[in-house]
Image (cartoon, grey):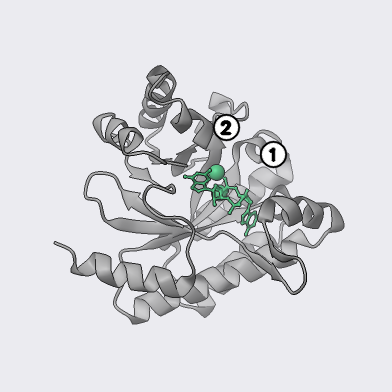
């Protein structure tokens, strides 16, 4: 799903969202199979495959001259408790010659709160590689200020539930933006569905947005076509 710079209107990145086309069940949404894969122990293999596909996609974009673009993948708590995960990330980036700063790893606020010592070391090792760490679904968990200080996060993603009530209750987003500013985090608003929400976010100096108003999740081919169009615009 493309992510837009709210002020320039250009696409600056995308989030990799997994889809499963099952031969008899049709399209199975990730909310259905990811929780099962977490319990069955298959999530690590699945997410390593997503990581590989995402880096391959970034490699294709680079070959087409699109270099000012970043891609993020979702990581589950299982990856964070696996000390081998950072090495897998490092070697995949190397395989496709991807500069680490163009790659983001999204960790949900709930997973951050549950971080034990091993997981904190994993996050630090990922930071050492140079990939960006993004705090996903912000506002749905209970991040403590110490997590924001200790983990040196790069991006904060405001959960869709806050964007939905942006017009009726703007103070919540105002305070999230202030918090992000205090910790020098870039902010992505998730689930932007209306032009009013986008305009309010522009006024509030939120940096980036993703949501159905701008683009639904699309295929890799559609993304490449969209980026070529976008690079031709103004
Ligand atoms: P998420 O990381 O919070 O991803 C955002 C979800 O919101 C996506 O659902 C996306 O399609 C949806 N969305 C985006 N814009 C809008 C909007 O404007 N309105 C509404 N109503 N929804 C919007 P999706 O693709 O069904 O993914 C659901 C969740 O599954 C993700 O939530 C993420 O937690 C998980 N997931 C997806 N792909 C992966 C993956 O490769 N690995 C892991 N571990 N989890 C994944
Ligand atoms: Ca996400
Ligand atoms: Ca999210």
Residue 36 lies, in percent from the top left, at 81, 54
Which residue position is annotated with label 1?
115
Which residue position is annotated with label 2?
147
In the image shown, does 23 or 45 lie closer to the viewer? 23
Q: Give the mark nearest the N terminus, 2 or 1.
A: 1
Report whether 206 appears left or right of 136. Answer: left
Tell me whether circle 2 and circle 1 mark residues in contact (CB < 8 Å): yes
Q: What residue appears at the point 53 percent right and 25 percent down from the top-left corner?
A: 145
Report whether 189 appears left or right of 128. Answer: left
Is there any visible trace of residue 50 in the rendered image?
yes
Q: Residue furthest bottom?
A: 63
Q: What residue appears at the point 37 percent right and 38 percent down from the top-left corner?
A: 194
Report whether 109 appears left or right of 9. Answer: right
Query: Tag 2's secondary structure?
Result: helix
Residue count near mark 2 (Cα–Cα under 10 Å), binned few <14, some 14–19, many ≥20 = some
Q: Residue furthest right?
A: 40
In the rendered image, the vertical position of residue 99 relative to residue 134, given as above or below: below
In the rendered image, the vertical position of residue 71 relative to residue 8, given as above or below: below
Residue count near mark 1 (Cα–Cα under 10 Å), binned few <14, some 14–19, many ≥20 = some
Report whether 195 appears left or right of 17. Answer: left
Residue 173 lies, in percent from the top left, at 41, 25
Q: What residue appears at the point 52 percent right and 69 percent down from the top-left corner?
A: 54
Q: What residue appears at the point 40 percent right and 38 percent down from the top-left corner?
A: 185
In the image shown, does 25 or 160 lie closer to the viewer? 25
Residue 179 occupies which quadrant of the picture? top left
Q: Quadrant of the C terminus?
A: bottom left
Residue 128 lies, in percent from the top left, at 52, 55
Residue 100 lies, in percent from the top left, at 45, 63
């Amino acid at each position: 799903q493309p992510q837009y710079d709210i002020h320039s209107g250009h696409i600056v990145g995308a989030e990799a969202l997994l889809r499963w086309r099952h031969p008899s069940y049709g399209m199975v949404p990730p909310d259905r199979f990811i929780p099962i894969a977490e319990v069955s122990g298959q999530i690590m293999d699945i997410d390593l495959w997503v990581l590989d596909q995402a880096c391959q996609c970034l490699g294709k974009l680079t070959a087409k001259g699109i270099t000012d673009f970043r891609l993020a993948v979702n990581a589950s708590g299982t990856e964070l408790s696996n000390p081998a995960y950072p090495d897998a990330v490092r070697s995949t980036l190397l395989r496709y010659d991807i500069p680490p700063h163009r790659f983001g790893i999204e960790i949900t606020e709930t997973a951050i709160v549950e971080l034990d010592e091993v997981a904190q070391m994993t996050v630090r090792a990922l930071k050492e590689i140079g990939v960006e760490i993004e705090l996903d679904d912000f506002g749905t968990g209970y991040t403590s200020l110490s997590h924001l200080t200790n983990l040196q996060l790069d991006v904060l993603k405001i959960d869709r539930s806050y964007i939905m009530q942006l017009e009726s209750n703007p103070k919540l987003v105002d305070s999230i933006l202030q918090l992000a500013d205090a910790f020098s985090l870039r902010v992505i608003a998730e689930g932007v569905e209306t032009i009013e929400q986008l305009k309010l976010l522009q006024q509030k100096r939120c940096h980036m947005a993703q949501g159905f108003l701008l683009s639904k999740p699309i295929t890799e081919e559609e993304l490449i076509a969209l980026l070529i169009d976008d690079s031709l615009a103004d």
